[in-house]
Image: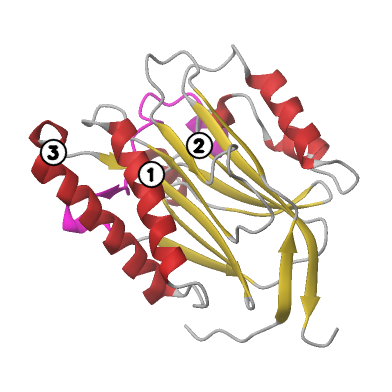
């Protein structure tokens, strides 16, 4: 995949984030950077959800976030193409394996992964599992990732409608994750080259989507609104009403300067 520089710079407002426990006994979600260290200097964002039913989900998501961030920080001027993202995921997987070797009780841990990285060619989206990424322009959802799940596979085969997936007994079965098995390390990739001032990028775990629908996203993620106010609306809408952990990172584009500007 070849990247053509389209922007002299893409500047971001300070992102906003949260990670809430929902009705679960532990929080297996993790976001990076978190709300304590977010600033307009970050260009890469990661959101993960440790897989329930597998060991040490909360550890898997934290290792994945910090390892991906570490790899990004070591390669600050790289275009995040397929090879780069594959190397980043391999680096994270190796960190997870090292943890497993020291903590045998965590063997088999795995996590979903979503990441958005901004660079001169636009934004690279990479994901594994059923956490999701949206690009929204003044209330219009321009793009959203397709979950790696059993029910979405049935939708692709024409055996299930999208509406039917919401209540299917196997709706939480994930078909691709970041784990220590070799078969679980290839992320899906999307490069978005059309980025404009006031666009939003939303990364979130599936728990947030228990209550946050496309209609809410279209109503609240509008050009005139500030990210902090949107965060407050989403928290108010979801707090105390979701079963799963729910987490998000919301990024708003401050300006996207093309090379011709």
Give the image location of residue 157, x and y in percent.
41, 50
In magenta, the rendered stretch is 162-185
Label ID, residue 82: none
Label 2–label 1 contact, CB within 8 A: yes
Q: Nearer the N terminus, badge 2 or badge 3?
A: 3
Residue on which disc 3 sits: 107
* Vertical side of 199 occupied by 227: above or below: above
Give the image location of residue 45, x and y in percent.
54, 53
Residue 194 belongs to magenta span: no
Q: Image point 57% across, 30% down: which residue?
A: 208
Residue on which disc 1 sits: 112
Give the Cα distance between marks 2 and 1: 8 Å
Q: Image point 49% across, 41% down: which residue?
A: 31
Judged left or right of residue 7, residue 185 is left
Residue on which disc 2 sits: 205
Give the Cα distance between marks 1 and 3: 16 Å
Q: Nearer the N terminus, badge 2 or badge 1?
A: 1
Location of the C terminus by quadrant is: bottom right
Q: Residue furthest right?
A: 224
Q: Image point 51% across, 86% down: which residue?
A: 2
- Magenta segment's dominant SS is loop
Give the Cα distance between marks 2 and 3: 23 Å
Q: Image point 80% across, 33% down: which residue?
A: 229
Give the image location of residue 125, x and y in percent.
53, 61
* Vertical side of 114 occupied by 21: above or below: above
């Amino acid at each position: 995949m070849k990247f053509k520089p389209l922007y002299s710079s893409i500047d971001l407002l300070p992102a906003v984030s949260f990670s809430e426990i929902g009705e679960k006994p532990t929080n297996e979600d993790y976001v990076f950077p978190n709300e304590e260290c977010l600033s307009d200097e970050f260009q890469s964002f990661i959101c993960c959800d440790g897989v329930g039913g597998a060991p040490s989900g909360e550890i898997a998501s934290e290792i994945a976030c910090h390892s991906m961030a570490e790899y990004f920080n070591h390669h600050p001027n790289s275009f995040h193409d397929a090879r780069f993202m594959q190397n980043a995921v391999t680096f994270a997987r190796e960190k997870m394996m090292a943890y497993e070797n020291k903590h045998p009780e965590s063997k088999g841990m795995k996590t979903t992964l979503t990441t958005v990285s901004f660079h001169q060619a636009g934004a690279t989206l990479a994901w594994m599992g059923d956490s999701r990424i949206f690009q929204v322009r003044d209330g219009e959802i321009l793009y959203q990732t397709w979950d790696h799940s059993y029910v979405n596979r049935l939708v692709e085969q024409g055996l299930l409608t999208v509406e039917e997936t919401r209540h299917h007994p196997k709706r939480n079965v994930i078909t691709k994750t970041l784990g220590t098995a070799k078969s679980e390390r290839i992320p899906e990739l999307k490069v978005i080259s059309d980025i404009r001032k006031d666009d939003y990028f939303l990364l979130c775990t599936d728990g947030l989507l228990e209550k946050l629908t496309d209609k809410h996203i279209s109503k609240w993620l509008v050009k005139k609104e500030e990210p902090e106010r949107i965060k407050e609306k989403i928290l108010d809408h979801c707090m105390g009403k979701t079963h799963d952990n729910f987490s998000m990172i919301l990024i708003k584009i401050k300006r996207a300067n093309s090379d011709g500007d």
